[in-house]
Amino acid sequence: MSPATSDSTTEQLPDQHSERFEALENRLEALEAELEHKDDRLEELERECDRLEDRTATLEERVADFEERVADCGSEPTRLENMAEAALKKASANKSRVAELQSRELEKGAHLLTETVDVHAVDIADGRLERLTKDDGNAYYRVPESADPLERGGTVSLAYGDLLPIQQLARMDEEMRRSAANALPTRLAAKLWTARVDDGVGDDPWKSGCKDIAEYVKASDLKHWIRRQESGISETYAKKLVSRVIDAMLDLSKNRLAVRKRTERKNGLEYTERRLLLPADAAIPGDGGPPADADRESKTGGVHG
């Protein structure tokens, strides 16, 4: 080998080592940077792990708390059921005591507000209770025909069963009256009675009497009144209905009303006309006069039991 060649090789070796060293140095720097990055990431993961552990501990505490609450809730229905059962037993015992007291008071003649009485719970000797309304506007129960010893609620507005059949029909509305009475004369009789006792009706053929007659209605006036009540009725049919309505009035009033003939004069001519009379001393429930002691068999109306 020539000297020139040897020198050239010697010069190249340091250059190669220098380049390799520089490359290794760069690689080392990159590795150091990567290691530093991984250290940062590791620190970040450790912090995240700490947070997760804290979070896990918190969740575990909450789970434990929920488990305790669930356990408490599991026993709560049983506690509430026991309380409800005890309350029902107490209420049932109280209701039985109240029913017993009410039964005794009713049998003694007491009048008790209907809203406070369970008619299925009270035990009355004959099993009957009557509903009535007093002048205080309240509804009461009583043993039939018993007077209130304490006189609460004022006087009695007659119970339904105390009324005459004509009064019972008069209290019904038109639909109920049609269901209760198929015959037209019966319904007209109820309307005629209503016209006498209710000023709001307007079409009232009754006239005031004198002496022993409280009120009356003439047959001729009754005929015109019938035609006003039932449209399309001929005068001939209305005349026939007059007799039937009068008969119905007598029957439904249990003959508290009466019929009399009276001679009158019109246009110089005399004629005899029937009159339907309400005697001044007629025993009409709620109208004053003597007590209506007769015909009490209808008293069971409005009675429970």
Image (spheres, grey):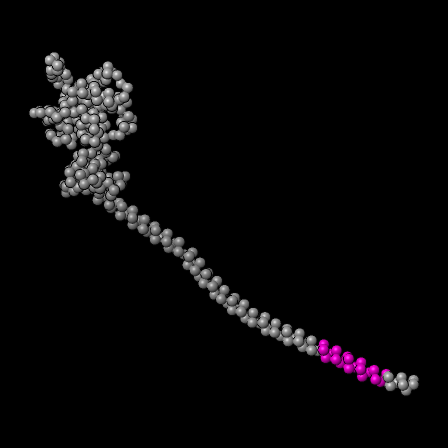
Residue 193 versus residue 153: which sits nearer the camera? 193
**Quadrant placement of the N terminus:** bottom right
Task: Locate the C terminus by quadrant.
Answer: top left
* Residue at (29% x, 50% y) in the render: 90
Observer-nearest residue: 170 or 71? 170
Closer to the camera in the image, 14 or 104: 14
As drawn, 199 above or below 95:
above
Q: Is residue 26 magenta?
A: yes
In the rendered image, the residue lying farthest to the bottom is 3
Q: Is residue 66 left or right of residue 246?
A: right
Q: Is residue 182 left or right of residue 255?
A: right
Tell me where the magenta segment starts and ends, as one range: 9-27
Quarter location, residue 226: top left
Which residue is found at the position 87% from the left and 86% from the top? 7
* Residue 200 falls within the magenta-colored stretch: no
The answer to whether residue 268 shows anywhere in this view is: yes
Percent coordinates x, y for residue 158 in the rendering: 18, 34
Name which residue lies at 26% across and 30% down. 173
Of helix, strand and loop, which mostly describes the magenta segment? helix
Residue 57 position in % (x across, y down): 50, 67
